Image (cartoon, grey):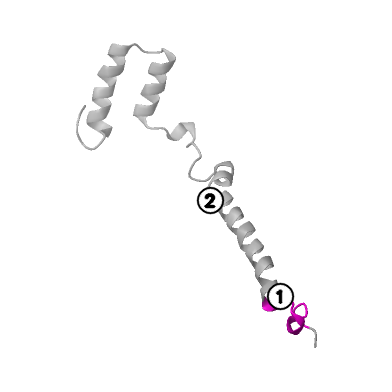
Amino acid sequence: MQTLAHFGDGGPGPWILFFPLLWALVIGGGIVLLRRTVWRDRRGGPLRQPPAGSDSPIAVLGRRFASGEIDEDEYWRRLSVLNEEFGRGGGAV
């Protein structure tokens, strides 16, 4: 009987099944890695930015300061009020 590529005649025997299995694991691992990192961002996973309507007041204040709508004094004054209300870790800055 000639099975597994002529095992009795000096062929590779059951090892012939190892390499296709190895390639399947490598390709499957690559797909899993891509799905957990790169492709997740495109599908709206955890790397995606939240919608503009759900930004925190501190983030909105930072954007207004960066765009020049408010000056530095007004930024720090409003930030101190927001830190008392929405504080980072419970304390004022």
Residue 87 higher or lower than 21, as above or below: above
Asked where in the image residue 74 lies, by quadrant, the reply is top left
Going from N to C along the chain, the mark reached first, 1 or 2, is 1
Question: Residue at the front extreme?
Answer: 10
Q: Is 9 left, or right, of 84 in this rendering?
A: right
Please tell me which residue is depicted at 26% across the width and 34% down the height of the picture.
Answer: 88
Give me the disc on residue 36. 2
Q: Is 86 left, or right, of 9 in this rendering?
A: left
Disc 1 marks which amino acid? Pro
Residue 75 higher or lower than 30, as above or below: above
Asked where in the image residue 4 lies, by quadrant, the reply is bottom right
Q: Is 34 left, or right, of 4 in this rendering?
A: left
Asked where in the image residue 91 lies, by quadrant, the reply is top left
Residue 4 highlighted magenta (yes or no): yes
Q: Where does the image place residue 79, in percent across and percent down from the top left? A: 28, 23
Residue for badge 1: 12
Please tell me which residue is depicted at 49% across the width and 36% down the height of the picture.
Answer: 49
Residue 93 highlighted magenta (yes or no): no
Q: Where does the image place residue 71, in percent across and percent down from the top left? A: 34, 11
Q: Report crowding for label 1: few under 14, some 14 to 19, many 20 or more residues within 10 A (C-alpha).
A: few
- Which range is magenta? 3-14
Please tell me which residue is depicted at 36% across the width and 13% down the height of the picture.
Answer: 70
